Amino acid sequence: MKVFLTGGSGYIGRATIEALLRHGHDVTSLARSDRAVETVTALGAKAVVGDLTDLDVLRTAAAAADGVIHLGAVNSPEAAAIDLAAAEAMLEGLDGRGAYVHTGGVWVYGDTDGVIDETAEMNPPAITAWRLDNEARVLATATSGSRPVLVMPGLVYGRSAGLIEAFFVEPARATGAVPVIDDGVNHTTLVHVEDIAELYVLALDAPAGALYLGVAQSVPFKELAPALAEAAGRPGSFEQLTAEEAAERMGPIAEAYTLDQRMTGDRAKRELGWTPKHLDAVADLAKGR
């Protein structure tokens, strides 16, 4: 299969290119800079130069593909509009010939009452509230002949990178202690970058309108903190922050890190045969795996 993806030079994108190639797919990736071109071509993908606002480039690349995976994102006040316009352009280019796999995220569910699945009500923190309308509009295209699929990753970790590295491990290296918000009893829903990459590949064969929680385990943050301290080279060193202090230090994303979420990825396992291999986030994070 010929697969076009955005965000190929990013954290999840690099692992997804590797997974696509292992499955025998021909991969083309959007690349917005010379460095991104070098990254995706070194992995074995072809590069298409452009960014998420180049709608003609996206439409043309999607038209040449049998399936599309949208991993790209921008950090901008216009993120919602850019994401939706890009999705619509790629859906138009693909024209129902294959799956369009869109990226969501589990934070839109807010705090959960016990273990939930994809059918639960959503109550997003402010930082991800914009996703609800975009995702609904993307999935609604299934009624007009498109094959939209929504993958909703948990907090992605692994390979000493990702948000958990940026907001907890790296600050601990600088300050000497891992930040822990409140008492740390809230559950954090996790998935290894290599496992979520496999789910993106499998989602190319999913039915129109399907959505999948890409989660492998849910762990209280206080159980993760010792592993993060070890990874930072600061074993046993923690700094407790109030929610207000965390917001001052981390910005709006701090609210998402206080969510108490427990979820199951059983739908993806049952319908797509997804089999996460990394099931001990504590050990993985401590060793930087």
Image: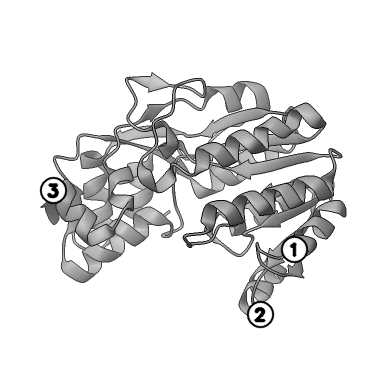
Q: Which of 192 and 189 is in front in this view?
A: 189
Looking at the picture, which amino acid does disc 3 mark? Answer: Thr
Tag 2, which secondary structure?
A: helix
Left or right of 193? Residue 94 is right
From mark 3 to mark 1, how far is it between C-alphas? Answer: 44 Å
Looking at the picture, which amino acid does disc 2 mark? Answer: Asp
Q: Name the residue under label 2.
A: 34
Q: Name the residue under label 3.
A: 242
Looking at the picture, which amino acid does disc 1 mark? Answer: Ala
Which colour scheme appears in the figure?
A: one colour
The residue sitting at 84% across, 38% down in the picture is 96
Query: Which numbered disc, 2 or 1, marks the residue closer to the eye?
Result: 2
The residue sitting at 63% across, 49% down in the picture is 84
Query: Which numbered disc, 3 or 2, marks the residue closer to the eye?
Result: 3
Percent x, y of residue 9: 61, 65
Left or right of 233? Residue 270 is right
